[in-house]
Image: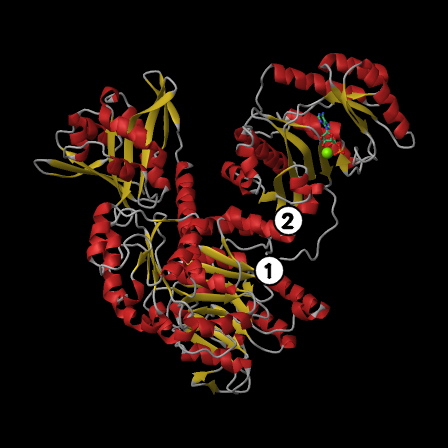
Amino acid sequence: MGQTQSEARQAKSAKRIARKETPDPQGKLLKDELAEIIHQAVRENRSYLMEHESKEILEGIGIATTGYLVARSEDEALAICDKIGFPVVMKIVSPDVVHKTDAGGVKLNLMNAGDVHKAYRDILETFKYQHIEGVAVQRMAQAGIEAIIGVTRDPSFGPLIMFGLGGVFVEVLRDVSFRILPITEKDAAQMIEDIRGSGILKGYRGQTVDLGSLQQLLLKISRLVVENPEISELDLNPLFLYPDGYITVDARMFVSEPAHHEHTTATGAESLHDFFYPQSIAVIGASDVEGKLGYNVFKNLTSHHYPGKLYPINPGKESLMGVRTYKSILDVPQPVDLAIVIVPAKAVESAIADCCAKDVRFIVVEAAGFAETGEEGKKAQERILKTIRKHGCRVLGPNCSGVINTHHNMVQSIGLLDDLKKGNVGMVAQAGVYAAGILTGLSNVLDFGIVATIGNKMDINETDILEYLSDDNHISVIVMYMEDVRSGKRFVDVASRAAVRKPVIVLKSGRTEAGKKAVSSHTASLAGNDEVNNAAFKQSGVIRARDNEHLFALTRAFSKQPVPKGNGVLVITYTGSLGVAATDMLYLSDMRLAALEPYFKQRLKSALPDYASIGNPIDCSFSMTPEQVKNLIEIGVESGDVSSFIVVIQGEILGSFVDVMKTIDYKEKPVMCVVACKEFMINDVMKMEQAGFPVYSTAEMAAEVLGQMYHYGVRRQSALTDSIARHLTKDAFSVDNNPVRLRLINPKDIGLWTDFVNSCSEKSLWLRFLSPFSATPERAQRFCNLNPEEEVAVVAEMKVGDQYKFLGIARLIKNKRCEGEAEYAIIISDPWQNKSLGITLSEQCIELAKKEGFKTIRAETIQQNYAMIRIFRRCAFNLDTKDENMVSMSLNLS
Ligand code: ADP
Ligand code: MG
């Protein structure tokens, strides 16, 4: 019964625990001898590990379980009870029994030897016709909050982790959340937060759950599965959560030979820049016969004044629209950056072979008749793929409508398009018709930069384009219309990085369960397509739109208005009811009405007639005028609590607002307009939109969009701060034998910052700020709540008692007037000056500045600040200028 092997492992692991040996953080989480359980099962073609095997693995990585001992006789069962104490639980151990309770194989709460004897015999009797390995004897866990953690695999996204509360929550309500592996600490926290029942974990009849240890558990499972690809699925079901820790009551792992390739497209490292900005284009299949697609494509290129070289390829013509033609692309004497192929499907392969022979790097196949039509087309596509891989060129399509780049006057579309204005929206669309159809309508209210249609995405796919758009400085909002996500794992990677740079808004259709695969684990049965997509979007910070209307409501806002920096909103309306509608939706969106300071209230009052009610929302009644609104906004802009505006305007007089609204200085605070039934006032709405103000039909939509913008900003800042924090190479050292910690300052540090400033001598403060300086609440806000794109502050802190205390603060501030330059300033608390702390802190900031891509650091101080000048010299700063008061020093980082 192979017990000795397991016993040997048990003895070893007991020793491991006794020596409190923590697993090597760099090495694998699971020791080889335990990984062997998995390998062996795979070799034996078993599809899953039984409870005791799974729990042994879990215990081996420090996850608490009710135990994994197995008895092969009644005496052994009793011996185990002696070891672990009563009450105990006994369970059938058999490779044939998956659901133990249903089969009558779980005996709970056994109190004494008599119970154990009986349970043992009962189990043997019940399973006498099955293969029995033994009977597991384990501790009876105390009741706790039941939860489930699972892992399953998705063909596109790879392994996913699931968390939910047990029992009715998961069985009936399907109240679970998913993330794609690996997860970060933040993901773990967020997925606990995500379930509807999360309130129960935080406090239910006085009970709370140890969220910290639950997060650590999720992280461990993530690491276990990532490091051991043989684990295909896993269920910890149930898990009992306690105010202090947790215990795994049942565990099951499904194992299989790891799949070698998780479907990813092999993309070259080379950027797609020249694909979007080609210097020369050949159009294979260009035509001068109106109505032909080859005509439309070539016409679009000429009529939009494509600035590069054009080479129409047409064997029957001397010239097309005044441009010299060639019989074959091989006849073109100059190099060609990009070729558009718009010929009948059967001629496409030889056209592509010609492009390859000509060394064309990018090919856009607009021709249709491939994988979308059936087997033959699929095979043709596969042959093309082989050819292009061999030559290393990249292909968009087939069955697409090419690319539009208004910043390069390049329109490759199949449908004829009128003038397009240059805009900042980048869009990826699957179907060309979709892009063309909405483009015509939307171009009245929205200006696009780049539109790429991916068609059958044989090679270049949505993720490649997303990656490029996130790099293109003309683009500040990315919109994706997706039908399926291919190579989902790479999508999450790329989207996470893109969403830190600019908003990525996705409309994903196909929220159905169709195409569901054979299900083995419980977790897999809960992982519908849409749960997985949702997880992927949340995890990468992508904003998911409900439908087309929502998609473009968000796009117009992000494209035209800045992201609000706070959640206080001032609502200006002509009718109370729409003010109420806006208010409700603001609070549902985790936003709030700005609280007006008395001074601003007074000013607002004087800007309005007596009968108007002063508050927020401000109700101007039907006598609302553009000048009034201008006044109100200009007052509101000054208030610290107002971070954005919603203005509800009467449709009949909308036109009179356009010019006035343009003259207001909003000081980077966004404004959304609401016009009820705007579709009947569409000309004025278009004017307003073109002036840069998004107009919504409902106050709810305006409020919701504003909320989504604000929360995007918050996520973005926190992601940026995290990525900067990861660049701190040294976060702990010692000064005078005291352990000192380095980290970035954050908005929660207001108290510590204030204490620090109060503890500094007047002289130190004066040397740092060059004027008298003291801590005020406003300054504390200003110095702790930083926009990571503009400024970072690193603090050195030390633990005194159970409290931390700042010893010094250094700041890098982006110099807006000098690209690539950061200004540097540092202050050290008086007793810690001249102890190398300033140098260590400065060295770390220099490292950080390098990694953040700065080219130079500049520091200025007065000549008397000898201590500071010494630090800068030690860090190899050069003296740039010096007058009788100031020295300016700089360090070149490149
Ligand atoms: P299965 O899921 O195969 O039916 P489990 O091991 O999950 O079997 O047991 C079924 C239920 O019995 C669990 O959901 C849990 O409520 C209870 N249970 C099982 N083992 C223990 C234990 N060691 N301590 C306390 N309760 C247990
Ligand atoms: Mg179970």
The image quadrant of residue 303 is: bottom left
Please name the residue that numbered disc 2 is placed on: 262
> As rendered, which of 646 and 840 lies closer to the eye?
646
Report how many numbered discs are placed on residues in the image: 2
Q: Position of residue 654 (x, y in %)?
A: 32, 70
Residue 306 visible (yes or no): no
Instruction: Give, as a three-letter code, the residue at label 1.
Output: Arg
Q: Is residue 373 visible?
A: yes
Look at the picture and state if 501 lies above or below 351: above
Corner quadrant of residue 740:
top left
Residue 359's place in the image compared with 818, above or below, is: below
Closer to the camera: disc 1 or disc 2?
Answer: 2
Residue 104 vertical position relative to residue 516 in the rendered view, above or below: above
Question: Is 492 or 505 nearer to us in this picture?
Answer: 505
**Image position, residue 61 (x, y; %):** 62, 27
Q: Where ligand 2 lies, by image quadrant? A: top right
Which of the numbered marks, if any, corresponds to residue 389?
1
